[in-house]
Amino acid sequence: MSDGDDAADSSGADEEPTAESLEERLTAVEEELDAAETEADLDEVEATIDDIESDLERADLPEPDEDDDAEDPRADLESKVDALRDALEEARGPYGEDVVAEIDEAKSTIEDTRWTEQGEGEVAEAVATFTDAAAETLDGSFSADGADTDSLVAALDSVAEAVTEAGFDADDDAEEIAALLEATDALSTGLEEAQEWDDLLVNEQLEALGFYDCLGHYKDFPPEWSAVKEWEKQGNVEMVLLALDKLGDSGFMEEHCLEAITRMGDPGAFDEMHARAQKRGKPAIKALGKMGADAEDAVETLVDYVDADSDPALQKVTFKALGEIGSEEATQALADKLAMDNDNVRPHAARALGLVGDTRAVKPLTDALTDDEHDKVRAAAAWALRQIGTETALEAAAGAADDTAFVVQHEAERAAETLASSDTDAEAPTA
């Protein structure tokens, strides 16, 4: 047999590939992979795998019936090819690029992690150890200019740049690459062991942030509640929000934090209350109302709840909040609810319109005062007209003096008094 015939036999290219022949070739490649020592050897193994995969694709192999439990030779061979490729990739390198990738990961960890004061020192120490080790391999100086994040990241960047510029060869520079990877492993371990903020218990975090600094000798139990009350007295909404964030899993503390925020009415809590309001949180909606005009950006969210007829409690707190915020954007939506079925909710819509003070509400409020069957609704409509306070609104409210309900008569009398007072002021002589 000629040399050409031998080559044809070894490659299988001139024969119709069979499951058996492909299996034999894969076994041989596996042995070649085990024996490979250089990147060039691995390149040859990869080329052989490519040839086998091509032959596998064109091979006419038996296919099992759908209902047959027999083995599928093609699937088995494809699985072995994939396994060989994975083994090939594991055998390659390591490369200089691997060192750079590890450095980049360490940089991300440093930048994205919140460290404690102790942890910051440990991170700086881990970076210093790494740059010293890198300096020995790369023959350079990479020490950080300081212990802050920017300085540490800059030092790591300088090492990564030096590795890239070195152009390491996987075969010729294997020792250098191995030394650098050993250093990056140590860096990674140092960062893992450095103390992160999340490692601290909640009370330790609060203490580190000065949450308990406001407490005197005497305090209610739990001390967190006492601190919230004290921060409320001092007008420090940020500390109350901190307690809500860290202790909100406790229903007790969540309730008291939200009540404190509501009483404070501080727009500094808007973002957190708005986020909770978007999840239909009633205490948060109430808190938004107490912020008044400072919570106007929440009006669009709250108006969506005006028609939540299946949740009267949500409607009531929403109506009041919209009234306290005072945006005329809510007028039409609130006015429409004066005709809703629930006579326990309609009064809240009327009062909200009074708080908004939009004169466009005078007509629907007058209609409610005249036509609604329920005393509470008529009384609320009369009250709202007094709050709007224009002459037309006051005249409409005063016109209900003969109403059958005392509460409505009372509102009518007050409206009439206001009108009379206005007339007196208008007729008073001027200097």
Image (cartoon, rainbow, N blue to C red):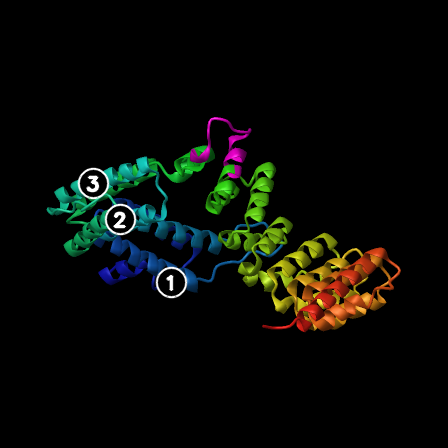
Mark 2 element type: helix
Q: Is residue 429 magenta?
A: no
Side of 289 relative to 180 (left or right): right
Furthest residue toward right: 404
Total residue callouts = 3
Residue 83, position as x, y percentages in the image: 39, 49
Crowdedness near tag 2: few (<14), some (14–19) or many (≥20) residues, C-alpha within 10 Å: many
Q: Nearer the viewer, residue 240 or 374?
A: 374
Q: Amino acid at mark 3?
A: Ala
Q: Nearer the viewer, residue 378 or 398?
A: 398
Residue 391, position as x, y percentages in the image: 71, 72
Q: Nearer the viewer, residue 125 or 405?
A: 405
Crowdedness near tag 3: few (<14), some (14–19) or many (≥20) residues, C-alpha within 10 Å: many
Furthest residue toward top: 217
Residue pointed to by mark 1: 54
The span from disc 1 to disc 2 (Cα, nearest Å) is 39 Å
Residue at point 85% right, 67% down?
A: 371
Q: Which mark is residue 132?
A: none
Residue at point 22% right, 46% down?
A: 37
Residue 86, position as x, y percentages in the image: 36, 50
Do residues under tags 3 and 2 come within 8 Å of each other at their CB atoms? no
Reading the chain from its start, which is encountered first: label 1 or label 2? Answer: 1
Q: Which mark is residue 103?
A: 2
Classify residue 387 by image quadrant: bottom right
Residue 351, position as x, y percentages in the image: 71, 60
The span from disc 3 to disc 2 (Cα, nearest Å) is 13 Å
Mark 1 element type: helix
Residue pointed to by mark 3: 128
Side of 169 relative to 66 (left or right): left
